Amino acid sequence: MVMFLKRLSLTGAAVVLSTAAMAADLPAPVIEHIPEVPAAGGWYLRGDIGYKVYNEPNTTFNGNSGLLRYDREELDDAWMIGVGVGYQFTDYFRGDLTIDYETKAKYSGRGPCVCVAPGYSIENADIDVWTVMLNGYVDIGTWHNITPYVGAGIGASYVNVSGYNSVNPDGTTPSYDGSNGEWNLAWALMAGASYAVTNNWSVDAGYQYRNLGTGKSVKIHDAGNTRVEFKDITAHEFRLGARYTFDSYAAAPAPSYYPAQPITSNF
């Protein structure tokens, strides 16, 4: 009986030691930490520069002889610079509010002259524009960090006409001293593509068609309400810009815990 108990004790000790050794050989439980994933939404800042090609405006003069229309009109190209703030609502839609300044463009044209020597007067002026636009964009998709998009915008433009000068056929020069600004409804259609340089920075190249409304010169001295009006000021813009998107992370799910498998033994 004593011998049996000794053998039983030795057997139990061997089982305990064997189980401990097997447990030591098992890997530790795995806790998988899922990394943070950038959320679709996020605020961003943008800055743009661009080159503007104007179309010919429709210019008229409401003189004493009635409404006169100018011809041989030309509005020179100009530069633009702008800033804005926006938000990426989903992977496919974003919007921003932008403020742009468009540098002075030289206007030239001629108008029929009926009050003095017959012929045409030579007209010159400078036109510069401020715009405030609310824009929406559809990001079509992303391939190799390139995201093409289309969009539209609506807002207001402040069209300023300055330095107006008129030379009649007889050499007289009516006086248009000073400048005059007018607020207008403005809208734009746009398309382009952005390239993600990093998670935060992207560059943007795009085209915009802009309708800026109407501009008016100051009134001519000693001639009542007569002034020159520039209607349908439209332009093609070619823009290059950069966007900085602030980090915005979605809440990560709780870590996944994988316990070690239970040990089974058959004796």
Image (tube, grey):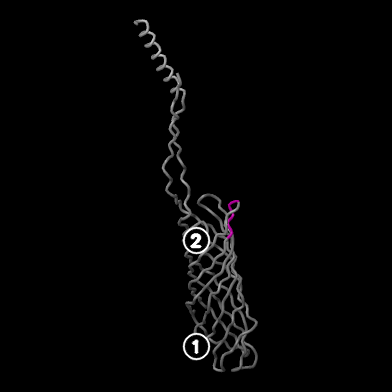
Mark positioned earlier in the residue sequence (1 or 2): 2
Please rate how many residues cluster around mark 2, counting C-alpha atoms within 10 Å: few if below 14, some from 14 to 19, many from 20: many
Q: Is residue 17 left or right of residue 75?
A: left
**Residue visible at 60% across and 51% down?**
144
Foreground disc of the pair 1, 2: 2
Near-viewer residue (156 or 191): 191
Residue 127 in percent (x, y) is at 54, 75
Q: Which residue is mark 2?
A: 94
Near-viewer residue (167 or 49): 49
> Vertical placement of 261 versus 76: above or below?
above
**Residue visible at 54% across and 70% down?**
188
Q: Label 2: state its secondary structure.
A: strand
The magenta region covers 144-148
Q: Which residue is mark 1?
A: 221
Within the image, what quadrant is residue 240 found in?
bottom right
Name the residue furthest left.
2
Q: Are marks 1 and 2 in contact (CB under 8 Å)?
A: no
Q: Quadrant of the N terminus?
A: top left
Q: How many marks?
A: 2
